[in-house]
Amino acid sequence: MNSFPPREICEVPVLRFAQIGTEIAATGTTTHTINGCPAGPVSSLAICDGGGTP
C-alpha cells in the first residue's frame, strides 16, 4: 500500500503536497503536458526538492 501523501517521488523528497478537490476550478491560463501531450485535470500537486537536479 502506498503512503499518502508520498514522502518521495522518484527518490526526490516531497516538500509540500496538496489535494485538489472539485471546488477548485481550472482557469485555462496554463497548459500542463506529459511527454509533449496535454494532460487532463489533476487530483493533487506536489512540490519537490530535486537538489539542483535538472
Image (cartoon, rainbow, N blue to C red):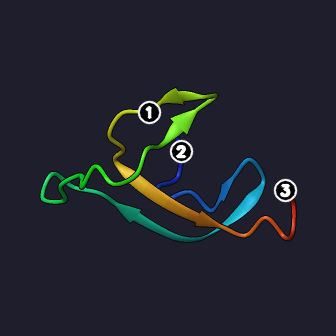
Residue at the image point whose x is 48% and y is 43% from the top: 32
Q: State the image quarter where residue 54 is shown.
A: bottom right
Residue 25 position, x and y percent, is: 18, 55
Of pointers 1 and 2, the one earlier in the residue sequence:
2
Q: Nearer the viewer, residue 34 or 8?
A: 34
Q: Residue 39 got which mark? A: 1
Q: State the image quarter where residue 12 is shown.
A: bottom right
Residue 45 position, x and y percent, is: 45, 58
Q: Are marks 1 and 3 in contact (CB under 8 Å)?
A: no
Q: Which residue is mark 3?
A: 54
Left of 17 or right of it: where is 20?
Answer: left
Residue 47 position, x and y percent, is: 57, 66
In this view, the mark in front (1 or 2): 1
Residue at the image point whose x is 15% and y is 51% from the top: 22
Q: Nearer the viewer, residue 4 or 15?
A: 15
Residue type of the residue flagged with mark 3: Pro
Alpha carbons under labels 1 and 3: distance apart: 21 Å
Question: Badge 3: how crowded within 10 Å, few (<14), some, or many (20+)?
Answer: few
Alpha carbons under labels 1 and 2: distance apart: 23 Å
Q: State the image quarter where residue 53 is shown.
A: bottom right
Q: Residue 2 got which mark? A: 2
Q: Are marks 1 and 2 in contact (CB under 8 Å)?
A: no
Alpha carbons under labels 2 and 3: distance apart: 26 Å
Q: Residue furthest bottom?
A: 15
In this view, the mark in front (2 or 3): 3
Please say if 2 is above or below 19.
above
